[in-house]
Amino acid sequence: MVEIYRHSDLFESLREPDRLKGKCGACEFRHVCGGSRSRAFATAGDPLASDPLCPYVPDEYDGEPPRPPTGRDGTTGASPVTD
């Protein structure tokens, strides 16, 4: 298990913020924040892609503005919390 974490290409790339893509790769906060790699993977199929729910767009980013993902019902945002 330790060998996989330390030496697999995926885990090595996740530990290198300069390998992030999209607006996360252009973000000046990538070494501190890094975005959500799980949300990137869930929406783009690439764990190094942009975090789709991050509202920040760095000045250096010249790609398409991020669009929040939509749920099954076509709405955006979090589900309401019920007790």
Image: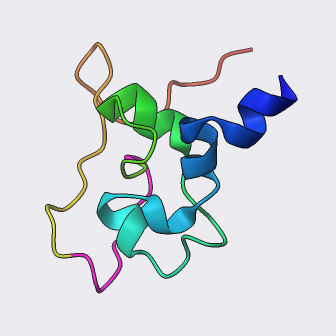
Q: Residue shown at 34%/28% (left/top)?
A: 45
Q: Residue shown at 43%/59% (left/top)?
A: 20
Q: Residue reaching furthest bottom?
A: 59
Q: Residue reaching furthest right?
A: 2
Instruction: Point out residue 37 in the picture as x, y percentages from the top left corner.
Output: 53, 42
| Above or below, comparing residue 83 to residue 51 in the picture | above
Residue 42, picture quadrant: top left
Residue 26, picture quadrant: bottom left
Question: The C terminus appears in which quarter of the rendering?
Answer: top right
**Number of marks:** 0
Describe residue 32's horizontal placement relative to residue 79 as left or right.
right
Q: Residue shown at 23%/48% (left/top)?
A: 67
Q: Magenta residues?
A: 52-61
Using the rendered image of the protein, determine whether residue 12 is visible from the camera's viewpoint.
yes
Is residue 54 highlighted in magenta?
Answer: yes
Between 12 and 39, the one nearer to me in the picture: 12
Is residue 10 highlighted in magenta?
Answer: no
Question: The N terminus appears in which quarter of the rendering?
Answer: top right
Residue 16, picture quadrant: bottom right
Instruction: Point out residue 70 in the picture as x, y percentages from the top left corner.
Output: 28, 29
Magenta region, mostly helix, strand or loop?
A: loop
Describe residue 19's horizontal placement relative to residue 5 as left or right.
left
| Above or below, comparing residue 59 to residue 24 in the picture | below
Between 10 and 81, the one nearer to me in the picture: 10
